[in-house]
Image (cartoon, grey):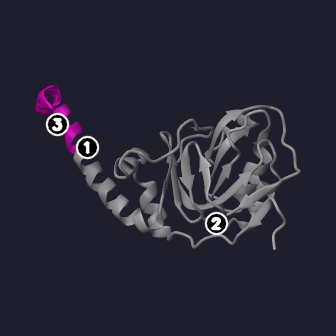
């Protein structure tokens, strides 16, 4: 039995490489539009050179400013995972920096999503290993615990369950339930085709904006 304040659960079944490859080809905005536009993080930003991220969530909840549970969570990470860290948005101590991010990359982790602070952003910003965080401080972490691994967490206002598929690009981060992912991919692909046609229409001077007046009238008379 885990002691009070500590819980550790096995990592969830991973998404297939084909699914992750498909997600990397689609903008997060397109995926988000096919999830009712109410999903995804707010307040987190990328600290790396642009690169699409997709992987299976391994989650951590830790006391703000303490990274002992994160170090332990590396033992649960597999190639193809994204480590999602709920640090309660605490910005007074960095939860990790260049060394821990480099170690995560060496494990085959596809990225880090951190609702907390990081440091060593000069080094991290020179690489394309995905690191999303709420903020930055030079002040290092404590290593006392407690923490929980592979439990539901909240990062940037978004709930993430172990095994969710986490995607990210320059616009932000989104978590997709495994049971929804095929439908979301299909919808995003269809929307990508629609938006490509709209851009072509703009280039050719035939972009249809008739819907604006119709919507305005509907709202005014509704």
Check residue 195 in the rendering and tell me which mark sits there, or answer none.
1
Q: Which residue is mark 3?
A: 201
Q: Residue 40: horizontal and vertical position, in percent? A: 48, 46
Upstream in the sequence, badge 2 or badge 1?
2
Considering only vertical position in the picture, is 150 above or below 92?
A: below
Residue at disc 1, secondary structure? helix
Marks 1 and 3 sit apart, C-alpha to C-alpha, by 10 Å
Q: Which residues are magenta?
A: 196-222
Check residue 79 in the rendering and tell me which mark sits there, or answer none.
2
Residue at position x 41%, y 45% in the image: 38
Left or right, 199 with respect to 108, comes to: left
Left or right, 165 with respect to 209, comes to: right
Q: Residues within 10 Å of mark 2 (few under 14, many from 20)?
A: some
Q: Residue 63: horizontal and vertical position, in percent? A: 78, 47
Upstream in the sequence, badge 2 or badge 3?
2
Answer whether residue 207 is magenta in the image.
Answer: yes
Left or right, 121 with respect to 48, comes to: right
Camera-side residue of 127 and 180: 180
Considering only vertical position in the picture, is 25 above or below 37?
A: below
| Quarter of the figure that contains the N terminus | bottom right
């Amino acid at each position: 039995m885990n002691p009070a304040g500590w819980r550790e659960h096995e990592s969830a079944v991973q998404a297939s490489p084909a699914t992750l490859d498909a997600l990397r080809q689609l903008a997060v905005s397109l995926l988000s539009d096919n999830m009712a536009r109410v999903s995804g993080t707010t307040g987190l930003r990328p600290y790396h050179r642009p690169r699409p991220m997709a992987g299976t969530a391994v989650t951590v909840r830790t006391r703000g400013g303490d990274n002992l549970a994160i170090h332990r969570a590396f033992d649960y990470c597999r190639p193809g995972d994204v480590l999602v860290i709920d640090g309660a948005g605490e910005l007074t101590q960095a939860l990790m920096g260049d060394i821990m991010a480099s170690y995560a990359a060496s494990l085959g982790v596809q990225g880090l999503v951190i609702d907390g602070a990081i440091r060593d952003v000069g080094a991290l910003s020179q690489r394309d290993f995905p690191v999303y965080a709420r903020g930055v401080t030079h002040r290092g972490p404590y290593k006392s615990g407690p923490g929980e691994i592979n439990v539901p967490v909240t990062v940037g206002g978004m709930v993430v369950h172990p095994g969710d598929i986490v995607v990210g690009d320059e616009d932000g981060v989104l978590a997709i339930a495994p049971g929804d992912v095929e439908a979301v991919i299909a919808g995003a692909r269809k929307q990508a085709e629609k938006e490509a046609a709209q851009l072509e229409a703009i280039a050719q001077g035939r972009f249809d904006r008739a819907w604006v007046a119709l919507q305005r009238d509907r709202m005014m008379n509704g």
